[in-house]
Image (cartoon, rainbow, N blue to C red):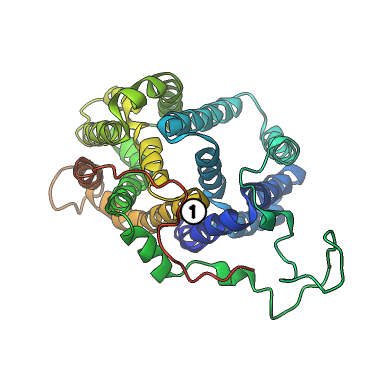
Amino acid sequence: MQIIGLGTLVMMPLIGNMSDKYGRKALLTVPLSLVIVPSAILAYSRTRNFFYAYYVVKTLIAMVCEGSVPCLALAYVADNVPEGRRASAFGILSGIASSAFVCGNLSTRFLSTASTFQVSASVAIASLVYMRFFLQDSIIDEQLTAPILTSKGKPKGKGKDYATNEIPSKNVQIFKSAPSLEDMLCLLKSSVTLSQAAVVAFFYSLAEVGLHASLLYYLKARFHFNKDQFADLMVITGIAGTLSQLVLMPILAPALGEARLLAVGLFFTCVHVFLYSIAWTFWVPYVAAMFSVLIVFSQPCMRSIVSKQVGSCEQGKAQGCISGISSFANVISPLLFSPLTALFLSERAPFHFPGFSIMCVGFASMIAFIQSLMIRIAPPIANEKVCNSNYVDA
């Protein structure tokens, strides 16, 4: 997970920024094509050598593609949805993703091991084909009509439709468009609201990944949960979150606003985590899982707030920056909470409190909640760029 997190920390801002220049559709093609490969490997064979190949390929592809599809999807929605309806649209998008998670989890109960990977590869291919044929690119720009790698100018004396297949080595340096740390800091400093949302994103991701890294071991040691019971918790969480995002969020977002709804979601995240940490019997985790009805408001509202702080030509860069910050939290969270969980579940614990690591996760989510209370939504930016960058167009 740490290796994947380091990869996505670098790749998310790059992919987001490139999608602003070359279009969402072109950049979506890359991860949707690559994710087919790991499932196809195990769909073909599950012998030891193929499993090792799957593990290596999966890790390398995840370093590039992990989180890129949701990031680009959010930027695409921001391109096409008015600001007043954006929070509801982000919630619906997250609800559809949650429903896909639930359906995938349930389908594994009825499919054989071989069929699982075959279905996974087939669905990945279907999503790629659907995207290429039916998705209309949201950025209308003359630059998007040219390939990503092409010559900078047109030779004299040629017609308007002339295209060259030459790729000059000096003029085309696509990775000059990669945002540097200075560029990301410039983006975050351009808006106090954007900086506050970045802090919320960091601590929310820190808590979320810390909970996932610790919860299974905690429930197994505390209440002897097996993998089926843990899967049941995931299904309950997914169903509750799906219904909430598809039904409640379109109603509550216009009435309360993104900032208040973000605070509500983070408050119940704290309650949810603290309830896990002090669980006294086996049914308490199931009750805690039901709080997902309100927890799921956090991520769409935070992304909606971010989308309104940048111009229409910087949605990919902004969403990629927030995804990169979340990836950084994903790297350090298991390093903090996994050893702490192991310590307090062992006989070497300084004091008897098996859920202490989970409570520490709750403190991280509390920091995100407190920061969310300080957010004051700045007037949205229409089309201007928030800062002058030094990116060099390919």
Q: Residue at x 77, y 73 (%)?
A: 167
Q: Residue at x 36, y 42 (%)?
A: 305
Q: Could you tell me how many numbered marks the image carries?
A: 1
- Quadrant containing the C terminus in the rendered view: bottom right
Give how far across and how far down residue 97 sits, in percent.
Answer: 52, 33
Left or right: where does residue 255 sit relative to residue 64?
left
Q: Nearer the viewer, residue 55 or 297?
A: 297
Reading the image, the residue beneath label 1 is: 314
Left or right: where does residue 322 sit relative to residue 98?
left
Q: Nearer the viewer, residue 358 or 202?
A: 202
Label 1 element class: helix
Is residue 369 visible from the viewing direction of this image?
Answer: yes
Q: Residue at x 51, y 62 (%)?
A: 7
Q: Nearer the viewer, residue 260 or 50?
A: 260
Give how far across and how far down residue 231 sits, in percent.
Answer: 46, 30
Name the residue furthest bottom: 170
Give how far across and how far down residue 172 sits, in percent.
Answer: 68, 73
Is residue 354 visible from the viewing direction of this image?
Answer: no
Give how far across and how far down residue 92 sits, in percent.
Answer: 48, 28
Relative to 46, is 287 above or below? Answer: above
**Is disc 1 surrounded by few (<14), some (14 to 19) or many (20+) residues within 10 Å?**
many
Left or right: where does residue 327 sit relative to residue 259?
right
Q: Nearer the viewer, residue 225 or 172?
A: 172
Left or right: where does residue 77 sit relative to residue 243?
right
Residue 245, picture quadrant: top left
Q: Three-letter amino acid code at disc 1?
A: Glu
Name the residue furthest left: 351
